[in-house]
Every structure is written in C-alpha cells, then in structure tokens.
Image (cartoon, rainbow, N blue to C red):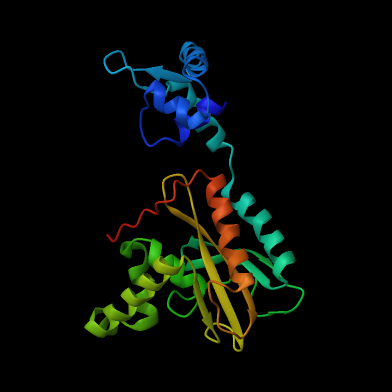
Amino acid sequence: MAVLDVLADSPGPLTLGEAARRAGMSLSQTRRYLVSLVRCGLATQDDATGLYDLGSRALRVGLAALARVEAIDLATAALKELVAKTLEGGTLAVWGDGGPTVVRWFRGGGIGVTSLGLGTVFPLFASATGHVFLTYLTEDNTRTRLERELGAKFLASPEGRRAVDAVKARVRKSGFSWLKGHFVENIRGAAAPVFDSQGELVAVLAIAGPDRQATATDPAVQALVEAAAQVSRQLCFSGVPRVNQK
C-alpha cells in the first residue's frame, strides 16, 4: 500500500529509484512490490521507458469508491462537528435554480438565527456564501442572478465589474469569504468552498456568529476552512479549483 500510495500521490510516472526513495524502501523491496502490483493490474510499467504508473484496475477501484461518496452526507457530518466546536450557527448550501440554496442548517449553541432555514436562498453579492459561489461558478451560472441583485446597467459598468472582481480576488486569496451585518443584522457570516475530484465547486459550508471581523487567525474561521478542506479531500480534490469564466 505504501508503494501504491506513492504512485497515487505522484503527478506522473516514476522510475524504480524515485518510487523507492519516496516510499522509503530499498530498490529490491520496491521492485518486488511493483511487480506484484503490475501483475494484478493496480500498476503498469511502460515497456519503452521502464516507468511505473497506476494501472487500469486502480482507476476502476477509484471510480467505484468515488461513486459511493455522497458529497452532501460528508459535508453535513463535517458541519455538525463544526457547529459543535464553534458554537455558531452553520449552513450547507448548494447551487439551486434560484441561487445559493440552504440544504442543511444547524443552530449554534451561542446564537440563534431564526431568519435562516432549509430552502433559504442567499444573495450572491450580499452574503459570504454567495461570494464563494460567485467566485468559483461560471459567469453563465451567476450572471442572471447577479443582474437581478445589482442591476444589469451597474453590472456592465466599469465600477460594477471592479466590484465583482474585487470579491473574487479576496475569496481566492484567503480561501474563504466573510461579511457582517449584510444578510442578517448584527451577525458575521463566514463561508468556505467544498470542491470535488474535478475541482468543481459542489457546496459551501458557512457559519454565522457574533458581529466581529473574521480573519484567517480567528479560531472559528480556521475550523470552518479546515472542515471544508477535509470534505474536499474526502471527495479527492487535488487542490486546484476549476475556475471557468464562461
């Protein structure tokens, strides 16, 4: 399994020596394992170059495992732990016909937000959750909703374009978004993205707490970002979001 993990973690095929070095094993030991993996189809060796890579059976096993993964279930479990840890209200949102739609909501121990609930649709430009969707979804998906919120004329203006681009730049730089007092008065919301194996945004985790500035050193925000990252890892996210502006 250590040798198989080395092949899986590598961005491309490996020589025997490189595989042995990364696995922390001798050349002879690594070669024996690689031969066994090749025989059962979990690895392959190129006849021309001698390089080792994952085999077709590894792909089949990986796809079968991925097909059994339920992103919403994983994110819901992470959200429950996050709410218990931070004592803040938590939401899980996906992109629906009307925009960022709450599909899970948990009340925190330290705050009660009664205006939120299942089916709540967050605004794109006036909520932390909306900012994450705005950043990582295509403009084809978000344009109509954004025009309704900001007006088509303003959105097409240089000022409007700069405002939208500034939001996207902040989210990409920090890895999360936060706003206070926009969607719910006197409440600070923070949100972080969940990506799938193809780097596509599949959901957004968010917390709502006391009206204070959220920073990367805020323990609640750190817990939020790590929870979203953990779900992304469980969904086999490679660490490179797919951002398509069309």
What residue is at 50 percent from the left and 20 percent from the top?
26
Left or right, 223 with reference to 107 = left
User: x%, y% of residue 43?
Assistant: 45, 20
Return the residue nearer the eye: 156 or 131: 131
Does any portion of residue 92 appear in the rendered image? no
User: x%, y% of residue 174?
Assistant: 45, 69
User: x%, y% of residue 60?
Assistant: 48, 25
In the image, farthest residue toward the front:
26
Q: Quadrant of the N terminus?
A: top right
Determine which quarter of the picture holds residue 180: bottom right
Return the residue nearer the eye: 168 or 143: 168
Q: Quadrant of the C terminus?
A: bottom left
Callout count: 0
Return the residue nearer the eye: 142 or 74: 74
In the image, farthest residue toward the right:
109
Does any portion of residue 225 appear in the rendered image? yes
What residue is at 40 percent from the left and 28 percent from the top?
18
What residue is at 56 percent from the left and 28 percent from the top?
2
Determine which quarter of the picture holds residue 152: bottom left
User: x%, y% of residue 178?
Assistant: 51, 76
Left or right, 83 with reference to 161 = right
| Above or below for 112 versus 237 | below
